[in-house]
Amino acid sequence: MNFIEVKNVVFGYDAAENGEETKKVLKDVSFSVKNGEFIALLGHNGSGKSTLAKMFNGILEPESGSVSVNGCDTKWEDTILDVRKSVGLVLQNPDNQLVASIVEEDVAFGPENLGIKPEEIRRRVDSALKAVDMYEYRHHAPYKLSGGQKQRVAIAGIIAMEPECIVLDEPTAMLDPQGRKEVMDTIIRLNRTKKITIILITHYMDEAVLADRVILLDQGKIIKDGTPKTVFSDVEFLKTHSLDVPQATELAYRLSSSGMKIENTPLNADECVEALVKALEKN
Ligand code: ADP
């Protein structure tokens, strides 16, 4: 059984609110997510990424079609709490997610709401703060932390609920390069060592290439779904949809357009250097 199953999902906001037939934000979206996968969800502003993110833990329900987590449809009321425990959501702005005046109290907030016993909460808070490398800041005030540190505390708050999957909606958009690196390192570590399934919405292609799989959404439809290598190899296709490719891929693409024979699609600086050295040896 797949961990998350999205089947023929159609959704429009006004329809959800007034029952009217209006513009659909998601149009027949289907895909599945395996346990432990790291997926990057890409697309223009307004393509429906955040709407889809809110479907994974039942904040929004499809108008037609279905979303299920561990075999439980997000429309089923008796299992919605299990779904919410399984899939945690981290948003763009850490300031909107931190609620307490002390870091460790903030991280405890989620498990407290789940009705977890105090000694178990203590264990989870310590373990979550260690997982994001913020344990030494446990007695600090969140507002004094850097953007990257705040976002890591927000992620710890989700980890403390021990989800199987974390959905992150542009978690690095408001951060400086250092903060972005801290958050991305944390996400990768959680995926690789704790086997937490990751669905990352991002505008940064250098973050997307770190995923196992890239899903491209355009005007509410999936237009590509594959490994970063296969998706970013089709530079022409991405360009016709005005989508970016990683810088290394762009450079190799331009060089091959001007006649240089470059094999493989490089996704990062190291792969680009390797491809260029090979190409220069041959030319
Ligand atoms: P993305 O995350 O890819 O930028 P969104 O899912 O946020 O896309 O938005 C998709 C479309 O839905 C946009 O046209 C947006 O204006 C609209 N939309 C998003 N949230 C709401 C809302 N709460 N009410 C009405 N329309 C919305």
Image: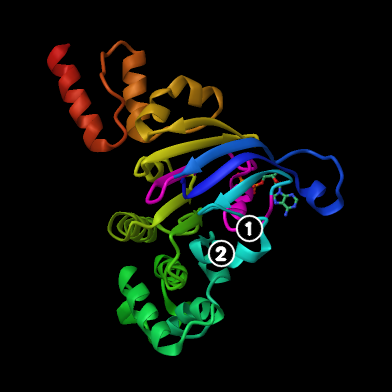
Q: In the rendered image, which quarter is residue 263 located in?
A: top left
Residue 43: tell me if it is visible: no
Residue 12: tell me if it is visible: yes
Residue 79 sits above or below residue 247 on the image: below
The residue shown at (74%, 46%) is 63
Quadrant where the image shows the C terminus:
top left
User: In the rendering, which numbered label is found on residue 84?
Assistant: 2
User: In the rendering, which numbered label is found on residue 26?
Assistant: none
Kind of residue at disc 2: Arg
Q: Is disc 1 placed on a helix, strand or loop?
A: loop
Range drawn in magenta: 34-61
Locate residue 71, reporting x and y percent. 54, 52
Name of the residue lying farthest toward the left: 281
Ranked by sequence position, the earlier of labels 2 and 1 is: 1
The residue shown at (40%, 67%) is 152
Asked if disc 2 and disc 1 are in contact, CB closer than 8 Å, the reply is yes
Name of the residue lying farthest toward the bottom: 118
Locate residue 150, reporting x and y percent. 44, 70
Q: In the rendered image, which quarter is residue 153 located in?
A: bottom left
Locate residue 87, reporting x and y percent. 51, 60
Q: Is residue 159 left or right of residue 276?
A: right
Kind of residue at disc 1: Gly
Residue 54, magenta (yes or no): yes
Q: Is disc 2 placed on a helix, strand or loop?
A: helix
Separation of marks 2 and 1 at Cα, in angstroms:
7 Å
The residue shown at (41%, 71%) is 156
Q: Where is mark 1, residue-wise?
A: 58
Q: Is residue 209 left or right of residue 41?
A: left
The residue shown at (63%, 55%) is 74
Q: Is residue 86 left or right of residue 258?
A: right
